[in-house]
Amino acid sequence: MAIRFLRPPLPCIDDVMNHPKKTTTPRTFHVKSFGCQMNVYDGERMAEMLGAQGMVPAEEGVDADMVVLNTCHIREKAVDKVYSDIGRLRRDDGSRPMIAVAGCVAQAEGGEITRRTNMVDIVVGPQAYHRLPDLIDKAARGEEALDTDMPVLSKFGALPDRPKQPRPTAFLTVQEGCDKFCTYCVVPYTRGAEISRPWAAIIDEAKALIDGGVREISLLGQNVNAWRGEDATGKQQGLAGLIRALDKMEGLERIRYTTSHPNDMEDDLITAHGDVEKLMPYLHLPVQSGSDPILKAMNRSHSRDSYLRLLDRFRAARPDIALSGDFIVGFPGETDADFQDTMSLIRDVGYAYAFSFKYSPRPGTPAADMAHQITPEVMSARLQELQTQILADQLAFNQATVGKRTHILIEKPGRKPGQLVGKSPWLQSVHVYAENAAIGDLIEVDIVSAGPNSLAGEITARKEAA
Ligand code: 5AD
Ligand code: SF4
């Protein structure tokens, strides 16, 4: 099902460019993902599927025969950006790769994309990308290749098993879609209704990832804490049950999950933060605003107070938990007083990290038609004030870890020779010089200094030997 958003007719970009349909079968590919972690996961699965079909990833710097643009529609200019990205794929000699537009822009725009440009061969929504190989065949035959169906579970069932890839961390989507219908958000339209992947499929995928060397799994979902399912014995479980099952899996060292909704939070999950050792002390819980009237207009179905009380319960279960959130400034009707309520909530919570955005009217969502839209100047000023506060809190949180002894999971080499970068339990990047450590190692360090975006650590053993 394609969602039709109300918006003015767009000019056809082929008035200025004329690039006929691609008619050869591609051999090499490149998947470019934009937006959230779920898109990153989808992009990986698409690449794995194309690999299983015998296609090979294009080498760095070499033009691919086929490019998948895995798009995001959450904020403004997404559609314009996709068209300019498409235009940039034109080569100097006038030729171009086969082009697939995937992700949420594909879902929202559907056939409008191929009406507007003939540079695109394939349009495939986020719930239909398991059919990409068929769509490629169709496109190679010069036929229309559009699929914006939403059969979520069959998508997962139809994807090939995850190949063994040595890497320390991996995403694992367990839940998709959203039934919350916040009045500003396109996700319920582009990703569809809330749906949970079955227990066994998740456990199998986790096993495959761990067998390949993954030591940290981040469970993903638009509302990941809405995940529900039956375990192997037929017992109903929520996200905490799933986390407890992963906790028992040998080789796995760390578990994270994102993104949660305050209204789907169950006692179990809070308790798990206190007694599941592998569950990292980090919670991303978007609030969007600190003002009750704005939360109501956003249809968030929680209040400022209920949100704060929820955080208190997490802190009681795990006192060192790092808190993170999402904020929107300039929602229609937001007064200075409403905005100051958001600022005071931020000061009350003391976030370790946060994502903040100017409100972006999304065509077809209720908020786009609300009265009292806020001017860009006011939004910019509010965003700047909010981000200054968040950055100060982030620095304070990081500085409070100086002097702590903790473990980091090494993820990649640093920029300087001999330097490695790992993540702390609180998701901070930690730079360390560790000759005997390798990517994937979990090493003990002392945190010796902190900036707003990263920390420096020293290996405990080395320091003691000195
Ligand atoms: N405008 C600005 N930010 C938005 N988000 C979602 N929709 C919009 C919008 N229309 C933000 C919310 C959400 C995050 C993923 O993106 O903060 O939590
Ligand atoms: Fe969008 Fe609200 Fe659903 Fe989050 S909970 S995906 S903001 S509708």
Image (cartoon, rainbow, N blue to C red):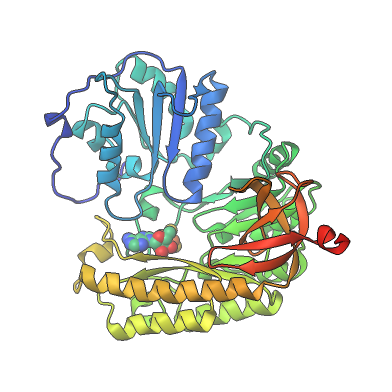
State which quadrant residue 369 falls in.
bottom left
Q: Could you tell me which quadrant the N terminus lies in? A: top left
Q: How many marks?
A: 0
Q: Looking at the image, which is closer to me, 140 or 387?
A: 387
Q: Looking at the image, which is closer to me, 148 or 173?
A: 173
Ligand 2 is found in which quarter of the picture?
bottom left
Side (left or right) of 211 relative to 364: right
Residue 331 picture location, percent across and down:
30, 71
Q: Is residue 211 above or below residue 59?
A: below
Residue 180 visible (yes or no): no
Residue at 57% over, 71% down: 323
Q: Is residue 138 above or below residue 400?
A: above
Residue 175 picture location, percent across and down:
55, 51
Q: Could you tell me which quadrant the C terminus lies in? A: bottom right
Residue 114 visible (yes or no): yes
Q: Is residue 57 above or below residue 412?
A: above
Residue at 19% over, 74% down: 372
Residue at 72% over, 47% down: 215
Residue 300 picture location, percent across and down:
41, 71
Side (left or right) of 324 relative to 148: right
Residue at 36% over, 37% down: 148
Q: Looking at the image, which is closer to me, 441 or 151?
A: 441
State which quadrant residue 380 falls in.
bottom left
